[in-house]
Amino acid sequence: MTIRIATAGTGQTFSWADIGFSEESRDISSQLVKILEERRQPISFSWRDTLRDELDEIIQDCSNPGWDGYDAEVVSAESAVVTQELIDVLPENIQVPALVPDPSGEIALEWRTGDQKYFSVSVSANSLVYAGIFGGFCKNYGEERFFGTIPATILHILTHHFPKA
């Protein structure tokens, strides 16, 4: 069997004959297909993959009580799932956030700029708790429900204060 994969934009086609029968051969073929399919994705989506990988790492690193050397709670499954959903709906035209585990078992997404702007969204179950300082005396904070779309208040803050450079 011959497998062919075309890359987006370049028109290049990769092909190889899959003649192996061993488990290792199937694993190599599977990995090659995955790598080549990832090359087909637009570069702009790669930051989401990076955040997903970071989220997986946080879940692993924070899977035991006291992961911070003190009394931190395990990252909750609900927070992990909702964080993934939030990552999936973040707009393309904003800066990439940092993911930060919270000792309460939640995960926060944080944005910072060099001009004294800071914004944090803490994810728990179906709730987004946010707080931001936007230079001088300008502050904004609150709590919004999350049902698969970013609440308008949070979306406005992200697009207005943290646009992609």
Image (cartoon, helix red, strand yellow):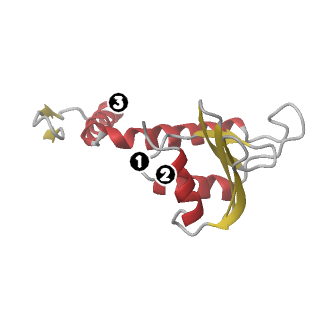
What crowding class fits label 2: few (fewer than 14 Cα within 10 Å), some (14-19), or many (20 or more)? Answer: some
150 with respect to 122 (left or right): left
Q: Residue at point 54% right, 51% down?
A: 158
Q: CA distance from mark 2 to mark 1?
A: 7 Å
Q: What is the secondary structure assignment of the residue under circle 3?
A: helix
Numbered badge on residue 81: none
Furthest residue toward right = 71
Q: Look at the picture and state if 147 lies above or below 111.
A: below
> Which residue type does callout 2 highlight?
Thr
Label 3 or label 1, whichever lies nearer to me, is: 1
> Which residue type does callout 1 highlight?
Asn
Q: Residue at point 27% right, 38% down?
A: 33
Q: Earlier in the sequence, mark 2 or mark 1?
A: 1
Q: What is the secondary structure assignment of the residue under circle 2?
A: helix
Quarter-of-image position of residue 136:
top right
Q: Residue at point 81% right, 49% down?
A: 104
User: Relative to the observer, which residue lies in front, 103 or 32?
Assistant: 103
User: Relative to the observer, which residue lies in front, 45 or 20?
Assistant: 45
Q: Position of residue 25 (x, y in %)?
A: 29, 31
Task: Give the residue pinned by disc 2.
Answer: 159
User: Relative to the observer, which residue lies in front, 121 or 37?
Assistant: 121
Q: Position of residue 67 (x, y in %)?
A: 80, 35
Task: Give the residue pinned by disc 1.
Answer: 93
Q: CA distance from mark 3 to mark 1?
A: 41 Å
User: Relative to the observer, which residue lies in front, 101 or 165?
Assistant: 165
